[in-house]
Image (tube, rainbow, N blue to C red):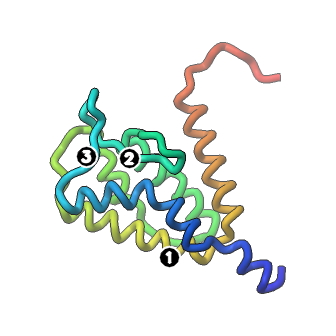
Amino acid sequence: MTRRQTLRNRPTLADMARAFGPVDTPLAQLAKGYVATDGETGGAVTQTIGGGWIELAPALEGLAIAWRRVLAHYRVEIDVGPLDRLAGALARGELIPQALVAECQATVTALKRAYRRMDGPTVKSLCNTTSIEILLADTPNTGRKAA
């Protein structure tokens, strides 16, 4: 692969904004002391790339799972544990310490730096595979057998 082809497959700033927007916004809100919530359940929510709303805790868990896979593929060492801790605290309805939010923001910044050096289509493929695995794990077994 030539240098031009490699650079063409690298994520752009717009790609980064799309990929990390759903986590940047709630982390910025938490840093200011608030977060968007669901009117019915009162749980923290975030807006997806498509414009829909999803619960923040499971979204952060999924983000951590997906990035573990991507980081393992590229053999990059970044600790995504703060995202897991924040997701757990949100799921339990605990108060969120500002130090944890700052750790998560630092983790996301490190992920962004690593993402800029990765192949965009490969990262997207790894994340899509992880999303499918999460959906299959959450879907109850309907009794169908594999062919």
Residue 142 is situated, as x and y percent measured from the top left of the image, at 63, 15
Rendered view: 83 above or below 15:
above
The C terminus lies in which quarter of the figure?
Answer: top right
Who comes first in sequence, dot 1 or dot 3? 3
Look at mark 2 in the image and give the residue it sits on: 46
User: Helix or strand or loop: what does disc 1 sit on?
Assistant: helix
C-alpha gap between disc 2 and disc 1: 22 Å
Q: Amino acid at mark 2?
A: Thr
- Disc 1 crowd rating (10 Å Cα; few below 14, some 14-19, many 20+) is few
For this view, does 62 lie left or right of residue 107? Answer: right
Q: Going by the picture, which residue comes out furthest to the front?
A: 51
Q: Quadrant of residue 135?
A: top right
Look at mark 3 in the image and give the residue it sits on: 89
Callout 2–callout 3 Cβ contact below 8 Å: no
Q: Amino acid at mark 3?
A: Ala
* Residue at position x 56%, y 68% in the image: 14
* Residue at position x 83%, y 84% in the image: 2
* Residue at position x 61%, y 53% in the image: 127
Question: Quick one: 43 or 1, which is closer to the camera?
Answer: 43
Look at mark 1 in the image and give the residue it sits on: 113
